[in-house]
Image (cartoon, helix red, strand yellow):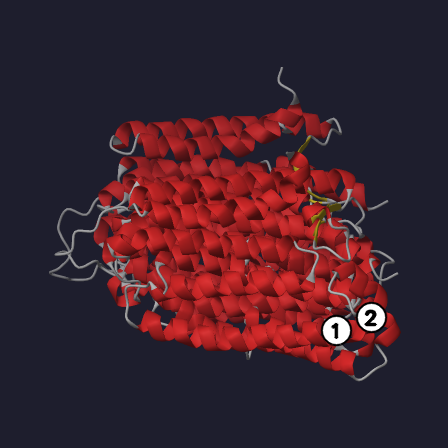
Amino acid sequence: MIDTNLVVGICLLLPVLGAILVLILGSRPNVRETATLLIGVLTFWHVWGLLDPLREGARPRLELLEIVPGVQLAFEVEPLGLLFALVASFLWIVTTLYAIGYMRGHHEKNQTRFFFFFAIAIAGAMGVAFSANLFTLFAFYEILTLCTFPLVTHHQTDEARKAGRVYLGILLTTSVAFQLLAIIWTWQLADTVDFTEGGILAGTASNGVLSAILVLFVFGVGKAAVMPFHRWLPAAMVAPTPVSALLHAVAVVKAGVFTVLKVAVYVFGIDLLGTLAATTWLAWVAAATIILASLVAFQKDNLKARLAYSTISQLSYIVLGALLANESGVIGGGMHIAMHAFGKITLFFAAGAVLVVTHEKDISRMHGLGRTMPITFGAFFVGSLSIIGLPPAGGSWSKWFLGMGTLEAGQVGLLAVLMLSSLLGLYYLLEVPVKAFFFRPLDDAHRGKGIKEAPLPSLIAIGITASATVGFFFWPDLWHELMTMVVSGVGQ
Amino acid sequence: MTDHLPVLLVVVPLVAAPIAALLNHPRLSWAVAVAATLWALYAALELLSQTMAAGAIHYELGGWAAPYGIEYVVDPLNAWVVVIVTLIGALVAPYARVSVEREITEDRIPLFYAAFILCLTGLLGIAVTGDVFNVFVFLEISSLSAYALIALGSDRRALTASFQYLIMGSVGATFIVIGIGLMYVMTGTLNMADLADRLPEVSGTRTIPVAFTFLTVGITLKLALFPLHLWLPNAYTYAPSAVTAFIASTATKVAVYLLLRFFFTIFGATFSFDVMQLDRILMPLALIAIVAMSLVAIYQENVKRLLAYSSVAQIGYMVLGISFASVLGLTAGILHLFNHALIKGALFMSMGCVMYRVGSVRLERMHGLGRAMPWTMAAFVVGGLSLIGVPLTVGFISKWYLVQAALEQGMWPVAGVVLLGSLLALMYVWKVVEVAYFREADPELEISEAPLSLLAPTWVLVLGNLYFGINASDSVDIATRAAEMLLGALS
């Protein structure tokens, strides 16, 4: 039996090893992809292995070195981080499978570079998930930004260059100008930046100062895409679809909301959070983001753009959950990380499959495609249900807890926002499968005769995530258990 | 021999310089330069470890006791500066061989190495001496050889750049010697420790503030603090690549050291900051330098010039840290001395690689270099990220301390400006990255990767950027010791 502290290191190193293997095996695509898959499975298996020690109350910890006096590069596994790591490492496997079909079907260039940075991005996400203090988290947060830049700009066109500017510009600006300031401020006030149960900031400064820090954190985590710092997400949609799927449904955006949750629970502590003046109005900023992004999503005919705005809206659910500052809110927010990841990645997979097979990007041109691609659009339907929060899909549980949270916080207005947003989602997401299944196919000379289902590896991937989405409706226990562990440590 | 290290550090290169000139053979002169820089690096590291272990080392030249004789004093601060200078020197010397063969005519190469070693000698002399007139002498040695080095640039504009630097540099040196002279008149001593003892008695007179003012202007001119930086961009742009890499990472750093030495050790922080209120002039100028010069850098088309303006902005960071006159602020400033030397050394060296293969560092000639010269441009990207201050690079460590120092004094807007500077750095670094990675290369040009002898020293510095960004405990420890010493000296 290996020491669990070492397992943490293994989970971080495996994706890096995978990246190196990709470089070495670059000239042989089949071996290269097999290696990535194997490493993915190994990573997930090791992350899974941390679950039992955590249940027994252990907190595996790995301290690498002291960067400057008092600040360590260190990792510690706690339930929230494990939840994120489980989601990211599992979906890495699935996405690799999907990418094999997509990248080849779409004849993408520079596939070795693609799979290389992909693996590095996962290492970055693991680092974020397991970081033991704000400094380590910030370091990996920035690594994640930088190593996804080549993925977003994969095509190296002018359009990609401009999108890359927006992507990097917003993410780095917010993180350097706001988040870093908040971190250094926290360090000055609390003399520590370690994540601690119950928080580290209580009693260190006035309500006003702590409120200011909270504002800096919420807007400084640009990856959480709270308006007005959301523009990078639609811009990043120029990337190949597997990138959009993993990074902009899972690794990058979830690293953002994960950071917000982590700061709320382990830096402020939900007790303190509830007393801050800024908490309520930030919750309303999140609520505004939920509604506004949904309204924008309505108007997008480009499927990936619509999904991007839907993501912005859903991310703010999680931010809102953190800012409700009660147990249900945090549980709901944390569960939504997992539920939304599985649901949204299904939607992106489906969108990519349609693109590869038919070269269609616009919803208005997908009429009738459901008849030839039933599995793809069926999966899209399931994913949509989960995002909207309807049974029988996992999303209903996280939304349930979020709703409870608004009531516990006495914010009926916020509950109304959640309801309204679900109604909007009902329309803008379900429009796609409805048109695909029930509308008459377009008469179009351009459209080739041989439209069939997506490539097999992609289809398998879609099947896995769609089934999981339904499965989590019946067995949400794992996510709920992890989040209960998070709040039970906090509520004393 | 270890007893004589402080003087051997300076004397060995001083002797090596004429040898390099007399040998008059490109390869042999180069070998002398490499040997001299390696010796200096060894001596510097040895001195640093000695002074960190056992406190300040005093060495009396020719056995004449201070204050009658000249004394060399090595403490954590100048040992640190000496390590920076010799480290860069020891990396630039091997790098120079290939680079210089391409950029300088063969008959001048031995003279180039002689001037290079002399410049190193001067910089080391300024750092270790405990005598203010000796400072002036070494300042002239390093400056005159620097003018010659810059004038060797292949572009004819190097001559005017060198001349401009000569005029400005001489004005600065003259101001410094006037300041020194006034202090000598009032106290009758040139020894730094002695001056520090005797100045308080006469600080009420009108002469000492005047001396202080002359020194301030002279030193800030030498370190290119905005708005006295005008000599710097041209000098850096047109000098041979190896010279730019060397001077950018060392000369201004030594000038910053002089600033610290004069205003903290000799005048003392109380006089400099409470009586003369030096911070009132340094801080605004530093802040303007950070913002204005970064903005100017964004609009440059020549990457060496872009980096030169960035240097002026970065000097702003160092001076800003010093202007807080607190332990944290000084730590940040002294840390950034070292960190910025690593950053700019790596960046200018990577541009030297480009110069070697492409013959120009203008942006329009750098299209598609990311593919043609992957290692060179990767070095630039890492150096650039460090300049921006991305975590796990040295640039981040500097920012971390600088922002802390600002927040400690409740100076909010100042912390904001520091971070704003990072974002501006992002803009000018990314401008280069986009050209190198997103523009199609001219298919007719066949550009290959730079030779190993250029890449190896470049990458040593790049890895240094990462290593000291991840494991900064040692550099922070030394900088803190130096800062505490400077502030403790007055109490």
Residue A404, position in %: x, y?
A: 71, 55
- Amino acid type, mark 2: Leu
**Residue at image coords 36%, 55%:** B112
Q: Is residue B97 left or right of residue A393?
A: left
Residue A284 as seen in the image, left or right of residue A104: right
**Label 2, residues with CA under 10 Å away: few <14, some 14-19, many ≥20:** some
Secondary-structure class at tag 1: helix
Residue under circle 2?
B199
Q: Are marks 2 and 1 in contact (CB under 8 Å)?
A: yes
Image location (x, y in percent) of residue A350: 35, 49
Of B280 and A407, the residue lying toward us = B280
Residue ID at (40%, 58%) = B243
Q: Where residue B440 sits: x, y (%)?
A: 22, 59
Q: Hey, what amino acid is under mark 1?
A: Met
Closer-to-camera residue (B248/B416): B248
Q: Chain of mark 2?
A: B
